[in-house]
Image (spheres, helix red, strand yellow):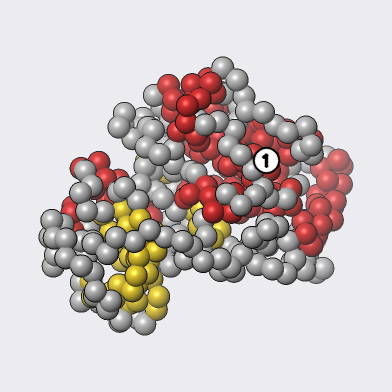
Amino acid sequence: MRVVSLSLSTKTTGKVAVGPEWSAADTGELEAGQLLAGRYRLDGLIRTGGTAQVHRGWDTLLRRAVAVKLVAPGAGRAAYRRFDNEMHVLAGLSHPNVVSVYDVGGRDRDSFVVLQLVDGPTLRDHLDRGAFSEAQTRLLGVLLSDALAHVHEHGVAHRDLTPTGVLFDHAGKPHLADFGLAGPGGSRTRRTDRRVGTTAYLAPEQVRGDVVGEPADVYALGLVLLECLTGRPAFTGRTALSRLGRAPEIPLSAPSDLAHLLSAMTARRPRDRPSAAACGMALRGFAAPVPPPAAPSRHRVLVGAATAVTLAAIAMAVGQTPDPTVAAPAAPTAIEAPRGL
């Protein structure tokens, strides 16, 4: 099996705010081996954006590699608010497919957060090189649905799920990141936050400025999985309003069960979308993307028995060997790189 293991090409500036002992106004050159808070050695910039920078680091106390995220120099007040929000949200989560937070420090412009190091490519890097297979799309959907279900169980809506915010480690395991816009389910986003770099993945209620909760995450995940199948976004930034009047196009080549699920996930009305947990179950083959009947039926028993065969086929497609001792094997945790990577 050829597993995801790519090097990222990143933009480096060499000028950052490096911790509470520095002022954010400082623009001194970052030197190799610079210590943050007397503990975290910064070993190089992994990626940078308009509001934050992520560095590869080394925890000199626990002797482990980490990622250190800092507010970007010159970022506005909204960036500090999102940064602080992300720290608090991640601190309350613990899931194998959600980036873990190890430590935080500083305040406002001096804020930093120490995270689990996930230094492989992003889902966006993969999609820029080509579409995923159906099996890879299903598996990715299972893992991200489970991660979202965990987030939602803690009363949080991500509200910014995009391919850029899905990070792969070098074993091919995806991790959900970028929680800067996360908030309580069923709340409104700030007007300044609704379209920050995520226009192509906004749910209709976000475009309208309505209450935004967990269904918006399901909608975004549906668009992400659809893009995995087709290799292109369902909507572009210029057509944000078009989703208010039409659903995204599902390719005719998609299997009927997957097409039905993607259509349900991207329904225009939030109440018509399945939960993240239901999406994970449907992608595993356990259930349709609607609540099952209260009483078990013989048909459901047969579907459950056939699930092992379905999952075995998916596992084989991504190079995994299912455990024959269990009737319903858990989904694999790694995704093989799409062809051409």
Residue 32, by quadrant, is bottom left
Residue 17, by quadrant, is bottom left
Farthest-out residue, top:
245
Residue 200 vs 145, above or below: the answer is above
Q: Residue 120 location, x and y as percent? A: 51, 64
Residue, x 18% and y 54% (percent of image)?
109
Q: Position of 22 compared to 83: left or right?
A: left
Query: Which quadrant: the N terminus?
Result: bottom right
Residue 282 showing in the rendered view = yes
Camera-side residue of 107 and 127: 127
Camera-side residue of 5 and 304: 5
Q: Position of 219 compared to 24: left or right?
A: right
Residue, x 39% and y 33% (percent of image)?
195
Residue 147 showing in the rendered view = no
Q: Position of 255 compared to 2: left or right?
A: right
Residue that carries the numbered disc 1 in the rendered image: 230
Query: Which quadrant: the C terminus?
Result: bottom right
Badge 1 density bin: few <14, some 14–19, many ≥20, Cα 10 Å: many
Disc 1 marks a residue whose amino acid type is: Thr
Residue, x 39% and y 78% (percent of image)?
64
Q: Residue 153 location, x and y as percent? A: 49, 47
Camera-side residue of 155 and 157: 157
Q: Position of 2 compared to 217: left or right?
A: right
Camera-side residue of 26 and 66: 26
Q: Residue 203 location, x and y as percent? A: 50, 30
Residue 222 vs 27, above or below: the answer is above
Residue, x 51% and y 55% (percent of image)?
122
